[in-house]
């Protein structure tokens, strides 16, 4: 039971402020995808420019999550969170008035820098403010806010583009970020590590360069293919730097003169290791789905961007119900005649059930065909959302439960970094499967045998290009073949995602800890107190 004292009420208001913080980042991740077709002609952007509008944000975000997690622990999480939100607010406004493609790419990179402290530090405060008994509910709220941004982005973006100019999709961030800043300033306590060691500058540079290489390599693989040097060269270099980072961290831990960037001992904890791995699995599958399904709704069903976002809302309904039920199952209660609070269900069972529902929803989604009704899509979206509501908050809670409060910033940053890289890998791998199956299916369709080879080649680039080419040529046969090929490719992609759900179920059963007794004591840092700077 949550504390009903003024302090207890206040920390739930802090949670709302933190949820707003991650919501605005989630919205920004998807609202741009809706606006790209509009922004491109206005800024005279090439296809490469359009890709970099998205990738400049992702690269900087992946590279700076860990350093900002460390700085939050050292300088103060409230201080860094306010700085990130203010920079996010200013940079969003600058994005809205970017004069050309190069300027927008540069400002989007700064926007990724501003988002880097928001994501891990908003999560890092949860072990400080909330007791283990309260934490499942708090994490469920945060995860719901994070994922709510994905369908809200297209809904808001579509509505704004229908009524205002393209820059309005960035300006929507400004009021939400300002509200979050005010709430954090008024309500959130300062927290951090009161006795930080020497800063690991070398480790920070190595890991940032490694993460940039890995992220860039997977991004390029999704567009240039896996055989291209622009894909495998940065991947090899990035992974080599990350291996070097592990050796560097082991060396400075043994020397004891510098505080390591990442406490490698965390990975000896089943709670942290498998909670993080399974949260990354969720991100892998989820971002792949978020990449595939909007294309289906827009290019196959003919929905505009606004309606596409609306059609994805059933996933949020399932997520909300699943998250609330999972939080209730994980909230400790005192057994009759006992003195030690015990949760109704442990991490193992909750996460396993979540992945099982994810697998079921995706397996149903993989049976989609060209004439499938919207009700069927809503059904498997609800099941998928329900599974996400179980799996993601519980796996994240498992990882957070292993973190000491003094180092929860960098620990949360490790979780968020792996999730970010997992999402990038998911889009690259699943995008490769989608593209290759789509081209094979389209090329083997007898209906396009008489279509000129240059037209077939252009249509094979993507479903969006295929629909545009078919409509320009006035060819109903080609349009039907394009849509059939994409649905077939989407079904294959969803099968892969469903298998990830099955694998997640197995790993959760094998490696996550079960139900354990839980301390329900008040956190060491109460609202209004100061730890660190």
Image (spheres, rainbow, N blue to C red):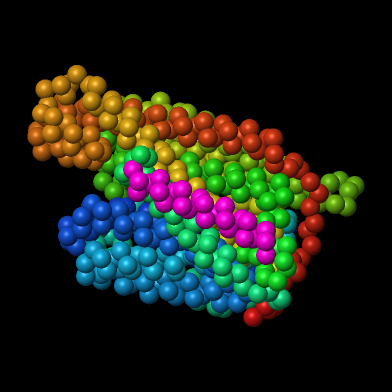
Q: Horizontal and vertical percent for residue 86?
A: 44, 75
Q: Horizontal and vertical percent for residue 488?
A: 33, 27
Please tell me whether the stretch drawn in magenta is mainly helix, strand or loop: helix
- Regarding residue 451, the answer to whether it shows in the image is yes
Identified at 39% across, 69% down, the residue is: 110
Q: Residue furthest top?
A: 446
Question: Is residue 341 toward the left or the right of residue 158 in the image?
Answer: right
Identified at 40% across, 25% down, the residue is: 367
Q: Quadrant of the N terminus?
A: bottom right
The one of 65 and 485 positioned closer to us in this rendering: 65
Identified at 37% across, 65% down, the residue is: 109
215 shown above or below 8: above
The one of 23 and 498 positioned closer to us in this rendering: 498
66 shown above or below 457: below
Q: Which residues are magenta?
A: 228-252
398 shown above or below 160: above
348 shown above or below 366: below
């Amino acid at each position: 039971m949550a504390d009903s004292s003024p302090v207890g009420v206040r920390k739930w208001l802090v949670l709302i402020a933190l949820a707003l913080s991650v919501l605005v980042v989630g919205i920004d991740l998807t609202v741009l995808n809706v606006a790209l077709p509009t922004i491109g002609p206005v800024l005279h952007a090439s296809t490469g420019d359009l890709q970099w509008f998205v990738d400049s944000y992702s690269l900087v975000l992946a590279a700076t999550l860990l350093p900002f997690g460390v700085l939050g622990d050292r300088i103060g999480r409230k201080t860094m969170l306010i700085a990130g939100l203010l920079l996010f607010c200013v940079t969003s406004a600058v994005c809205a008035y970017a004069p050309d493609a190069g300027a927008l790419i540069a400002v989007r990179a700064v926007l990724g820098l501003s988002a880097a402290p928001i994501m891990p530090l908003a999560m890092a405060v949860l072990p400080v403010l909330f007791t283990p008994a309260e934490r499942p509910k708090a994490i469920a709220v945060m995860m719901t806010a994070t994922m709510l941004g994905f369908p809200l982005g297209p809904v808001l973006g579509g509505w704004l583009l229908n009524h205002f100019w393209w820059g309005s999709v960035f300006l929507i961030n400004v009021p939400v970020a300002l509200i979050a800043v005010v709430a954090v300033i008024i309500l959130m306590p300062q927290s951090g590590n009161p006795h930080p060691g020497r800063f690991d500058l070398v480790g920070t540079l190595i890991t940032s360069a490694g993460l940039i290489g890995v992220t860039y390599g997977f991004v390029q693989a999704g567009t240039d293919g896996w055989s291209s040097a622009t894909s495998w060269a940065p991947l090899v270099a990035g992974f080599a730097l990350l291996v070097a980072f592990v050796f560097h961290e082991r060396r400075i831990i043994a020397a004891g003169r510098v505080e390591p960037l990442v406490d490698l001992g965390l990975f000896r904890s089943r709670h942290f290791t498998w909670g993080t791995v399974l949260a990354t699995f969720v991100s892998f599958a989820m971002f792949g789905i978020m990449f595939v399904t909007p294309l289906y709704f827009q290019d196959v069903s003919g929905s505009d961007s606004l309606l596409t976002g609306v059609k994805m809302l059933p996933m949020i309904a399932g997520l909300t119900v699943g998250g609330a039920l999972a939080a209730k199952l994980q909230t400790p209660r005192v057994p009759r005649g006992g003195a030690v609070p015990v949760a109704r269900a442990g991490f193992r069972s909750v996460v396993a059930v979540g992945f099982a529902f994810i697998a079921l929803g995706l397996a149903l989604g993989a049976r989609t065909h060209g004439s499938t009704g919207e009700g069927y899509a809503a059904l498997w979206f609800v099941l998928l959302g329900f599974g996400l509501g179980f799996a993601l908050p519980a796996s994240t809670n498992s990882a957070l439960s292993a973190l000491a409060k003094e180092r929860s910033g960098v620990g949360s940053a490790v979780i968020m970094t792996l999730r970010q890289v997992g999402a990038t890998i998911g889009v690259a791998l699943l995008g490769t499967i989608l593209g290759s199956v789509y081209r094979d299916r389209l090329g083997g369709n007898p209906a396009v045998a008489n279509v000129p080879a240059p037209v077939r080649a252009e249509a094979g680039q993507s479903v969006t290009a295929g629909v545009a080419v078919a409509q320009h040529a006035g060819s109903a046969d080609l349009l039907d073949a394009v849509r059939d090929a994409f649905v077939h490719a989407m079904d294959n992609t969803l099968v892969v995602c469903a298998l990830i759900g099955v694998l997640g179920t197995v790993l959760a059963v094998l490696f996550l800890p079960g139900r354990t007794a839980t301390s329900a004591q008040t956190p060491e840092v109460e609202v209004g107190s100061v730890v660190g700077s």
